[in-house]
Image (spheres, rainbow, N blue to C red):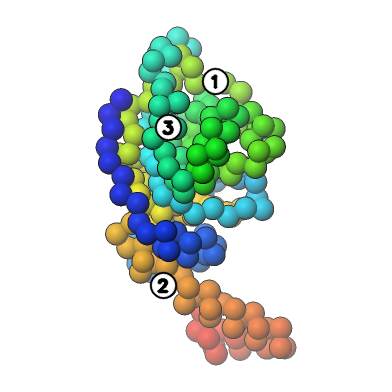
Amino acid sequence: MQEGTITRPSRNLLEGFKAIPTATISDVLDSMKISGIVNGFRCLIPSVRIAGYAFTVKSVAGERDTYTAADFPIGQVIAKMEEGDVFVVDLGGREVSHAGGLACTAMKARGVAGMVIDGGCRDIDHVLNIGFPAYSRHVCATGARSRVKIDAINVPIEVAGIRVCPGDIVVADATSVAVVPSAVAQKVLEECQSREELEGQFVANLNKGGTFEESHKKLGIL
């Protein structure tokens, strides 16, 4: 298993993103011509919003008995994660579980913020019971043992066509998953905060009886 490095941005930056919806991040990333929105994944706990550091995992999947148990050292990987990390897995969209109830329990105990898997997860009742935020392309019972090999951790990966690097900011809510490159995260946060303030004024204007068009002309946003 190849192991890269992860540099985590400041905690203050992370706290700021916890208040920002993915739709707002999408608009700001669009304005900066950055592709960072992962759509179409199942959100198991729609009532939560997470923000954390991308702890990336690159894995491959085959048929049963393709790999050995030693090829899937999930416990070793979890032991390297830190509080505030998000488990982000590139499994190439395969319909095989990369994490279930036991792995999620272990991650939660370490303070991991949640997981995003371009593949499958299972033990959904268990995951919901412990309240671990999970986003995945598939929900399936098919297990990883003998089917999945973890090739590398903390290297650049792709999740649904979106590049994710170790330490990038991952924000996820009921709408989508957003990946903000760490190099521009501060600027993105500032732009998002400005837009959220304007949208608050937009809503207030509507609640006072203003029309949508009037509010748009006054504030200049949609």
**Corner quadrant of residue 59:** top left
Above or below: residue 32 compared with residue 57: below
What x and y, as percent, mark residue 92?
42, 32
Above or below: residue 121 compared with residue 41: above
What x and y, as percent, mark residue 118?
47, 37
What residue is disc 1 on?
143
* Mark positioned earlier in the residue sequence (1 or 2): 1
Mark 1 vs 2: CB contact within 8 A: no
**Corner quadrant of residue 181:** bottom left
Amino acid beneath label 1: Gly
Which dot, 3 or 2, sits closer to the camera? 3
**Corner quadrant of residue 134:** top right
- Horizontal arrangement in the rendering, residue 47 relative to residue 160 (left or right): right
Above or below: residue 133 compared with residue 63: below
What x and y, as percent, mark residue 138?
56, 34
What residue is disc 3 on?
79
**Could you say which disc has been placed on residue 190 in the image?**
2
- Horizontal arrangement in the rendering, residue 124 relative to residue 63 (left or right): right
Label 1: how many Cα within 10 Å (few below 14, some 14–19, many 20+): some
Q: Can residue 92 be seen?
A: no
Q: Quadrant of the C terminus?
A: bottom right
- Horizontal arrangement in the rendering, residue 157 relative to residue 210 (left or right): left
Q: Secondary structure at mark 2?
A: helix
* Mark positioned earlier in the residue sequence (3 or 2): 3
